[in-house]
Image (tube, grey):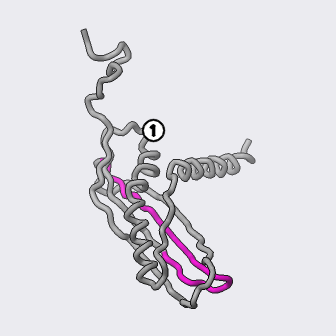
Amino acid sequence: MTDTSAAGNPTPGQQPANPPSLRVLGQYVKDLSFENPGHPPVQTQPNIDLGIDVGASPHADGNGLFEVSLKLSAKASAGDTVLFISELDYAGLFQLQNVPEGQVEAMLLIECPRLLFPFARRIIAEITREGGFPPLLIDPVDFVALYQSQYRRAAERAQNGNGGAS
């Protein structure tokens, strides 16, 4: 008797011989900027404009290595006065092994930034506090929804680009 089904897949409850794995080999600040153009006393809650971007690229060494970059930007203003602008590019070096090709992109753009986010969030909170403001505590991010939104926009751009072709 064998431990695989007719299709060659492991039977239910049995782990595959080489399961997919994700390793964090390093994480680091690539770029950090904090501008404090004016610090007037703020009597009201400032308006905060937050931006999040995720990118991934293969590392030059190959071997399943990828650099994933999480970019956070925050601009606080009260009326027409800019209180602060903070930008962080926080990256990690990840190694993927035995990940099916169709799942690599989702792993890089969902799971990797999910692992980086708490560290990037802490850096933004500390830099705003050091700039003389209350710490900016960014709410948790749904990277699945962000990925799906980016995927839909890319599909729409591709469709619009091909819409006039016959």
Of residue 54 and residue 139, the one placed in the foreground of this image is 139
Q: Position of residue 139 (x, y in %)?
A: 51, 61
**Label 1, on which residue?**
102
Taking the spot 57% from the left edge, 52% from the top edge, the residue there is 150
Q: Please tell me which residue is depicted at 54% across the width and 89% down the height of the picture.
A: 39
Quarter of the rendering containing residue 99:
top left
- Tell me which amino acid carries mark 1: Gly
Question: Residue farthest to the top?
Answer: 1
Residue closest to the eye, 158 or 138:
138
User: Is residue 65 or residue 13 the one in the foreground?
Assistant: 13
Residue 49 lies, with reference to residue 147, above or below; the image says: below
Q: In the picture, which quadrant includes the N terminus?
A: top left
Image: 80 above or below 7:
below
Residue extent of the magenta highlight: 64-86
- Which quarter of the rendering shows the C terminus? top right
Give residue 59's position: percent from left, percent from top. 34, 56
Magenta segment's dominant SS is strand
- On whether residue 63 falls in the magenta region, the answer is no
* Percent position of residue 103, x then y: 44, 40
